[in-house]
Amino acid sequence: MDERGTIEPKSTHAWRRELRISGVQLPMPFKAHNIEPPTNVVKTNKDELMRFFETMYRMRRMEIAADVLYKGKFVRGFCHLYDGQEAVSVGMEAAITYDDAIITSYRDHCTHIGRGGTVLEVIAELMGREAGAAKGKGGSMHMYNRAHNFYGGNGIVGAQTPLGTGIAFAQKYRKQPNCTFTLYGDGAANQGQLFESMNMAALWSLPVIYVCENNHFGMGTAEWRSAKSPEYYKRGDYIPGLKVDGMDVLAVKQACAFAKEHCVAGKGPLVLEMDTYRYHGHSMSDPGSTYRTRDEVSGVRQERDPVERVRKLLLDGLVEAKEIKEIEKVIRKEIDDAVEQAKASNPPGDEYLHKHIYVQSLKMEARGTEAAKTVQLP
């Protein structure tokens, strides 16, 4: 724009794109239960879309690296990958702050990144190294970041739902203007503890958002075979709910901002069903091809991939392709460097066996590796 307030010469297409990008029309409208849904027009801009792309691409490459490390036997035990579902974490974080709390299931690598964690912390934790998020003691299912109100990674199916309800109770008790996002999968949606938690949250109008990440197959059973009513956003009955396109980061951002405003206003809990999809199997021990076809997976990748959606928005007049490629190059190197740093990190020493048990140990003693020996707790 020049001194007279007129627009400097630029491509008409690019200028129209910049105008339109401030209000993107969502391709899939929200479905609502006992509440008026938010608008399907989402405000955004180039900088935000660039952040979305960088973060989701980082998550995608990290999970691919985790796959390679697992197959190379650098990672042992359980390992549940999040590729395909990145828009849920990134869109949610765009609508809240670190003063809001998140608790999730064992598919938690990318949630840790969203909460401000590093790729090194995730990869090192997967490998059981001291540089990991939980000092190498938790592994894949137990990422954690207390400073940013991320309460894990929980290995028991559905167990995080009453814990998330309790965190929301604490927020209300302390009169904090915040809420708790409690994430669980469609496989956990039939757990009795979820419905007990919802009942308590509704009775006490707790600021908790129950987020069902519906990737449609649980541990390997299609939703329609495991749930009489797979409309999970209606499962709260007396609790309002929204069904959201969980592959669209802008839709997730809009829904989560709406949900937070609802809860912080004292209106009680809300249920969000994120219609999403995991590209890998349930865990690394599951090939993910016995209960669905490879064509189905590739079809979702081609039509709904969350990373590619944002890439297309950016390439439609906002950035040049070479800029995107440079970002990808930098992130790939970042992941490679984190893997090497994680490999160089040591496993936690023996002294960590007795750390992080009590806040104050009161000089208690614990049984050692032999029955006749005891160890004084630090």
Image (cartoon, grey):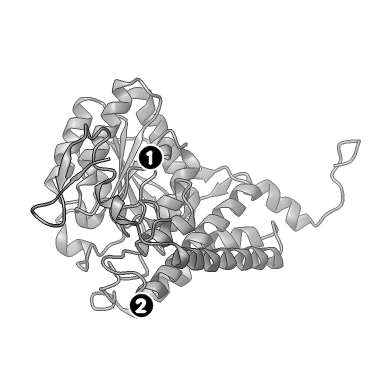
In the rendered view, would you say 248 is above or below 23? Answer: below
Q: Which mark is residue 71?
A: 2
Mark 2, residues whose alpha carbon is within 10 Å: few (<14), some, or many (≥20)?
Answer: few
Question: Is disc 2 placed on a helix, strand or loop?
Answer: helix
Q: Residue at x 36, y 53 (%)?
A: 135
Q: Earlier in the sequence, mark 2 or mark 1?
A: 2
Q: Residue furthest right?
A: 3
Residue located beneath label 1 in the image: 146
Question: Is disc 1 placed on a helix, strand or loop?
Answer: helix
The quadrant in which the C terminus is found is top left
Q: CA distance from mark 2 to mark 1?
A: 31 Å
Is residue 268 something one can see in this rendering? no
Q: Residue at x 8, y 52 (%)?
A: 372
Q: Position of residue 78 (x, y in %)?
A: 26, 65
Q: Position of residue 274 (x, y in %)?
A: 35, 52
Q: Residue furthest left?
A: 371
The part of the image, by quadrant, that contains residue 136 is: bottom left
The part of the image, by quadrant, that contains residue 311 is: bottom right
